[in-house]
Amino acid sequence: MSLSVILAEDDPDIQLVARLALKRVGFTVRVASNGVEAVTMARESPPDALLLDWMMPEMDGPQVCSILKSDPATAHIPIVFLTAKTQEAEIARGLSLGASGYVTKPFDALTLGDQVRAIIDARQP
């Protein structure tokens, strides 16, 4: 069974590389170009995981994470920040908002899918 992921990323080049990296290991990928789209998509059809950029138009990643984690219908979705924000305080903030993982850019396209799968597997009972 294929796992589904929402990739919330506004940069078309990063969307392409991340989408291909995730598809390579069997994920079904839906792309949201901003935070509002990501929230809408997650509520309409919850994914197995959400990869979330920190800096996006309309609503940033921390806002998206807070909204989804505060909603019982989406709180279970593992959220992985995929971001250029690399300061320890930023990583700690992302995790404190309820994110399950944190992958920094530039990321390794060959291991991204495995990293996401490991985060999902770690959340399984």
Image (spheres, rainbow, N blue to C red):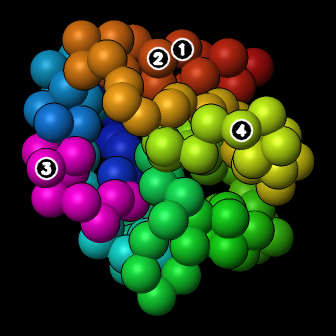
Residue under the point 22% across and 46% down: 14
The answer to whether the residue labelled 3 contacts the one labelled 4, judged by CB atoms less than 8 Å apart, is: no
Q: Is residue 89 visible?
A: yes
In front of the other: label 2 or label 3?
3
Q: Indicate the quadrant where residue 17 lies.
A: top left
Secondary structure at badge 2 equals: helix
Q: Is residue 44 visible?
A: no
Q: Can you give x and y, in whole percent of width and height, for residue 74 in the image? A: 65, 63
Q: Quadrant of the N terminus?
A: top left
Residue under the point 79% across and 34% down: 88
Amino acid residing under circle 2: Gln
Q: Quadrant of the C terminus?
A: top right
Position of residue 90 in the picture relative to residue 61 (left or right): right
Q: Can you give x and y, in whole percent of width and height, for residue 121 in the image? A: 58, 17
Which range is magenta? 8-16
How many other residues sit within 10 Å of disc 1, few (<14), some (14-19) or many (≥20)?
few
In front of the other: label 1 or label 4?
4
Amino acid residing under circle 3: Asp
Amino acid residing under circle 1: Ala
Numbered tag placed on residue 115 in the rendering: 2
Q: Can you give x and y, in whole percent of width and height, for residue 38 in the image? A: 43, 70
Q: Is residue 122 above or below residue 88?
A: above
Q: Earlier in the sequence, mark 2 or mark 3?
A: 3
**Residue nearer the viewer, 115 or 30:** 115
Numbered tag placed on residue 87 in the rendering: 4
Secondary structure at badge 1 equals: helix
> Which residue is disc 1 drawn over?
118
Q: Can you give x and y, in whole percent of width and height, for residue 41 in the image? A: 39, 72
Real-space CA distance between mark 4 and mark 2, rounded to the nearest whole angstrom: 20 Å
Q: Earlier in the sequence, mark 1 or mark 4?
A: 4
Secondary structure at badge 4 equals: loop
How many other residues sit within 10 Å of disc 3, few (<14), some (14-19) or many (≥20)?
few
